[in-house]
């Protein structure tokens, strides 16, 4: 069975907005849910990773999906633990 992933597009939004979107969406989802957020703000990765560690969620991955015309797009994945 494939796990359902909730996608958030936060391109063009600066911190703390991407983190707030992750927090809001995770609060609505059951344990084990996965969120994938696409961001252009390079600080979002560290913000989301730190928040996941602090509140016992699993921070899974961050990868640069492309770097074109000064737009760096990252994909950050986290899983709700409790």
Image (spheres, helix red, strand yellow):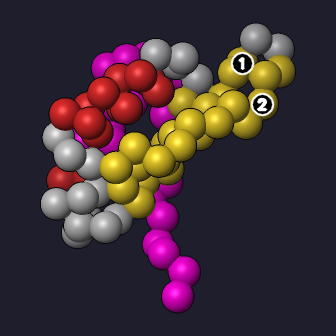
Q: Secondary structure at mark 2?
A: strand
Q: Residues within 10 Å of mark 1 (few under 14, many from 20)?
A: few
Q: Residue furthest bottom?
A: 1
Note whether 56 is above or below 34 in the view shown: above
Residue 49 horizontal side relative to residue 81, left or right = right
| Residue at image mark 1 | 71
Q: Position of residue 35 (x, y in %)?
A: 42, 54
According to the picture, the residue beneath numbered tag 2 turns out to be 66
Kindly identify the residue that appears in the image at 31 percent across and 20 percent down.
16
Q: Quadrant of the C terminus?
A: bottom left
Residue 33 % position (x, y): 34, 65
Q: Is residue 81 above or below residue 17?
A: below
Question: Is residue 75 part of the magenta span, yes or no?
Answer: no
Mark 2 neighbour density, 10 Å: few (under 14) some (14–19) many (20 or more): few
Image position of 22 with respect to 25: above or below: above
> Image quadrant of residue 40?
top right
Q: Could you tell me residue 52's position as x and y percent? A: 28, 39
Distance, label 2 to label 1, CA atoms, is: 8 Å
Question: Relative to 23, is 10 on the left or the right?
Answer: right
Q: CB of mark 2 within 8 Å of CB of mark 1? A: yes
Front-most of 74 and 7? Answer: 74
In the rendered image, residue 70, in percent from the top left (x then y), is placed at 76, 11
What is the secondary structure assignment of the residue under circle 1?
A: strand
**Taking the image as drawn, is residue 29 in sight?**
yes
Precedes in sequence: disc 2 or disc 1: 2
Magenta-span inclusion, residue 10: yes
Vertical comparison of 53 with 35: above or below: above
**Is residue 28 among what the camera can see?**
no
In the image, the segment drawn in magenta is 1-25
Please name which of the two marks, 2 or 1, marks the residue nearer to the observer.
2
């Amino acid at each position: 069975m494939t796990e359902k992933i909730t996608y958030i597009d936060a391109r063009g939004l600066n911190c703390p907005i991407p983190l707030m979107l992750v927090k809001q969406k995770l609060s609505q989802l059951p344990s084990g849910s996965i969120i994938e957020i696409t961001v252009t703000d390079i600080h979002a990765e560290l913000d989301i990773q730190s928040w996941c560690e602090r509140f016992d969620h699993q921070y899974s991955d961050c990868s640069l999906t492309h770097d074109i015309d000064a737009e760096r797009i990252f994909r950050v994945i986290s899983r709700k633990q409790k």
